[in-house]
């Protein structure tokens, strides 16, 4: 059978998709197969269509596609966004026999539905609650909570407040779309915690949109990050579009930024400049009013070496987080002790009062820890020790008579620690 590649106009996509759905087809992106070639064996040409648009994101289009195409038992239907026609028609000239436009007569255009979808698209960024939407009272409340929840880093907190205040003004004037913070520093000092805290202080209920660049270090990284934004339920959406769509707050965390490569760095330069994310199919998601927190373990020297001057100057605020002071570490332990005690009280009706706080403060020597993560681990360990002492002292008081309750008790305790 002849191999044909069909091109569609962007505006026709949903109509085309709908009419094919009625015929029993679903459309999948070629990236899915590239990432997992073994899927080709299970591929059903009678119910699946392959969209090749994302191929243009790859460097060696020809060889990647050749590796796949000969593994299909029957030739599937291939489609592609017409804006990629020139490139693919050239790259794939030895593979396809024909390049055609899809026959628009075969599907009915549903103007109304298209309109609805467009409206829905525009709503995307309005669905997020953003720092620029808070009124003055809410903003003061936000800052005071933020200061309380993040320990130490007092200079950063002052600067952060200033940055936000400036951002709110210039965003309204249309001059500043995204507030970008670049946080450097050793592991476990609270870089990621900044984004979590912003999210929580904005009262986020869903999940913080977080992308770990550690997962995006190979040559396919850009296309899996920004794969099609199309189809709001689509499974081959790029991760970043999915995460932003699924969260309720205008904050995006790009964790471990240095782990990725220059293609992604350039992509973010573009995002910060335009205030929009563009998917590999050319669709846009407006990020106006968002805060993007980039975190990185990078050293000062590597920061200059690895990240281009353009991008460096694009970040609104750069900061190196240093180790918390012993005093702040103590405060952190007290805070953790209080929150654990509270949970124990509500879960087991055991009132530990100030005991746990006193216990943890004496037995953990904060100056020997550099990393808050390690302090956290130690808190968990000491808490369990504390409980076994507590339990042996009060065995008759707590009603743990048989093994089943004991297992339940331990499991609940572990839940408390992880919560
Ligand atoms: N300044 C801080 N204030 C509150 N919690 C912190 C702080 N620093 C670290 N933590 C706690 O320590 C853990 C590790 O912090 P994290 O922000 O993930 O470190 P990193 O700097 O490596 O991103 C988190 O669970 C967080 O709760
Ligand atoms: Mg981190």
Image (cartoon, helix red, strand yellow):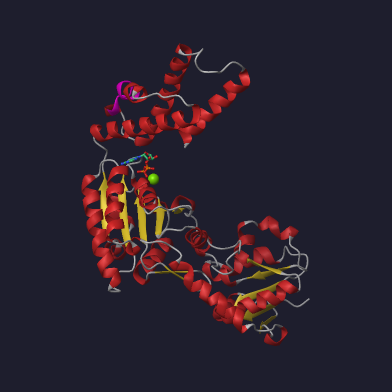
Task: Say which quarter of the image contains residue 294.
Answer: bottom left
Please tell me whether residue 364 belongs to the stretch shown in magenta.
Answer: yes
In the image, residue 79 lies at what x, y percent? 65, 75
In the image, residue 194 lies at what x, y percent? 34, 48
Total labels: the figure holds 0
The reply to whether residue 93 is in sight is no
114 relative position to 107: left or right:
left
Task: Say which quarter of the image contains residue 27.
Answer: bottom right
Please tell me whether residue 25 belongs to the stretch shown in magenta.
Answer: no
Q: Return the residue found at the far bottom.
A: 105
Give the prevailing secondary structure in the magenta stretch.
helix
The reply to whether residue 142 is in sight is yes
391 relative position to 106: left or right:
left
Who is closer to the viewer here, 176 or 369? 176
Who is closer to the viewer here, 15 or 221? 15
Q: Is residue 296 above or below residue 96?
A: above
Who is closer to the viewer here, 188 or 99? 188
The residue range painted magenta reads 360-366
Q: Residue at x 29, y 41 (%)?
A: 151
In the image, residue 289 lies at what x, y percent? 35, 65
Q: Residue at x 75, y 67 (%)?
A: 47
Q: Tell me the quadrant of the picture where the N terminus can be found.
A: bottom right
Task: Say which quarter of the image contains residue 6.
Answer: bottom right
345 relative position to 109: left or right:
left
* Ligand 2: quadrant of the figure: top left
Q: Is residue 84 above or below residue 141?
A: below
253 relative position to 281: left or right:
left
In the image, residue 236 lies at what x, y percent? 59, 62
């Amino acid at each position: 059978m002849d191999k044909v590649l069909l091109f569609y106009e962007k505006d026709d996509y949903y109509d085309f998709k709908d009419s094919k759905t009625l015929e029993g087809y679903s459309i999948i992106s070629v990236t899915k197969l590239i990432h997992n070639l073994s899927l080709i064996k299970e591929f059903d040409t009678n119910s699946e269509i392959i969209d090749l648009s994302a191929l243009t994101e790859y460097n060696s289009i020809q060889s990647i596609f050749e590796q796949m195409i000969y593994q299909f038992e029957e030739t599937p239907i291939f489609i592609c966004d017409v804006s990629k026609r020139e490139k693919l028609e050239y790259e794939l000239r030895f593979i396809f026999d024909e390049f055609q436009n899809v026959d628009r007569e075969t599907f009915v255009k549903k103007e109304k539905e298209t309109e609805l979808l467009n409206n829905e698209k525009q709503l995307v960024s309005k669905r997020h609650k953003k720092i620029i939407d808070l009124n003055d009272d809410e903003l003061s409340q936000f800052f005071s909570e933020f200061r309380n929840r993040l320990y130490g880093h007092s200079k950063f907190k002052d600067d952060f407040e200033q940055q936000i205040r400036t951002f709110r003004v210039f965003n309204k004037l249309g001059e500043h779309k995204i507030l970008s913070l670049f946080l450097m520093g050793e592991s476990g000092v609270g870089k990621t915690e900044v984004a979590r805290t912003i999210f929580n202080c904005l009262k986020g209920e869903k999940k913080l949109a977080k992308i770990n660049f550690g997962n995006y270090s190979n040559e396919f990284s850009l296309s899996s990050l920004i794969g099609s934004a199309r189809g709001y339920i689509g499974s081959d959406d790029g991760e970043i579009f999915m995460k932003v769509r699924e969260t309720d707050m205008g904050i995006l965390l790009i964790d471990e930024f240095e782990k990725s490569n220059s293609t992604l760095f350039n992509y973010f330069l573009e995002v910060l400049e335009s205030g929009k994310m563009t998917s590999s199919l050319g669709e846009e998601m407006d990020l106006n009013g968002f805060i993007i927190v980039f975190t990185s373990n990078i050293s000062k020297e590597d920061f200059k070496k690895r990240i281009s001057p353009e991008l460096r100057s694009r970040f609104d605020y750069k900061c190196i987080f240093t180790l918390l002071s012993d005093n702040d570490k103590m405060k952190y332990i007290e805070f953790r002790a209080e929150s654990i005690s509270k949970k124990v009280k509500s879960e087991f009706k055991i009132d530990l009062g100030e005991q746990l706080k006193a216990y943890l403060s004496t037995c953990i020597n904060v100056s020997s820890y550099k990393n808050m993560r390690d302090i956290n681990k130690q808190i968990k360990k000491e808490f369990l020790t504390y409980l076994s002492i507590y339990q042996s002292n009060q065995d008759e008081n707590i009603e743990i008579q048989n093994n089943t309750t004991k297992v339940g008790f331990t499991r609940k305790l572990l839940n408390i620690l992880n919560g």
